[in-house]
Image: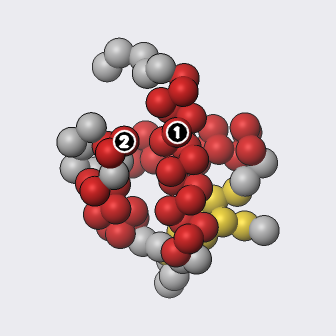
Amino acid sequence: MPKQNSAILLNKYIWLIDTIYSAGHISREEIDRRWCRSLLSEDEMSIPPRTFHRWRIAIEELFQISIEYDKWKGYYIED
């Protein structure tokens, strides 16, 4: 897979933050459904699990925003 342009990758991180924050709590399945409708998806049907976790770690390092998981409610942003 070719390396992505930094600006595009940053936009994907921001999309994920906004998607989770707007929902409050959200499942991975719902994140993937919304991803399919996003212009950033480039026709990808889902965010692969390894990619999702790389993005989650990068978001925490870059923005100090922690994306947590609750098995009953789904993903959420830790305040």
| x and y percentages locating residue 33 in the rendered image | 29, 63
Q: Which mark is residue 40?
A: 2
Q: Quadrant of residue 68?
A: bottom right
Three-letter amino acid code at the position of disc 2: Leu
In the image, residue 74 sits, relative to residue 36, either above or below, namely: below
Q: Earlier in the sequence, mark 2 or mark 1?
A: 1
Query: Circle 1 sits on which residue?
Result: 11
Q: Residue at the location (39% across, 62% down)? A: 31
Q: Kindly identify the amino acid type of the residue bearing the numbered disc 1.
A: Asn
Dot 2 alpha-carbon crowd within 10 angstroms: few under 14, some 14 to 19, many 20 or more = some
Tell me what residue is drawn at x 63 percent, y 38 percent: 58
Is 50 situated left or right of 16 in this image?
A: left
Q: Position of residue 76 (x, y in %)?
A: 60, 70
| Percent coordinates x, y for residue 62 in the rendering | 72, 38
Front residue of 70 and 42: 42
Name the residue rendered at 72%, 53% in the picture.
65
Q: Secondary structure at mark 2?
A: helix
Q: Residue 26, labelled with which disc?
A: none
- Left or right: 48 with respect to 79? left
Q: Is residue 54 visible?
A: no
Relative side of 51 to 23, left or right: left
Chosen colour scheme:
secondary structure
Cα distance in 3D space between marks 2 and 1: 8 Å
Residue 60: in sight, yes or no? Answer: yes
Number of labels in the image equals 2
| Callouts 2 and 1 close, C-beta under 8 Å | yes
State the residue in front, 9 or 67.
9
Residue 75 position in % (x across, y down) = 54, 68
Asked whether, in this view, residue 55 is left or right of residue 49, the answer is right
Element class at badge 1: helix
Task: Give the quadrant of the C terminus.
Answer: bottom right
The quadrant where residue 43 appears: top left
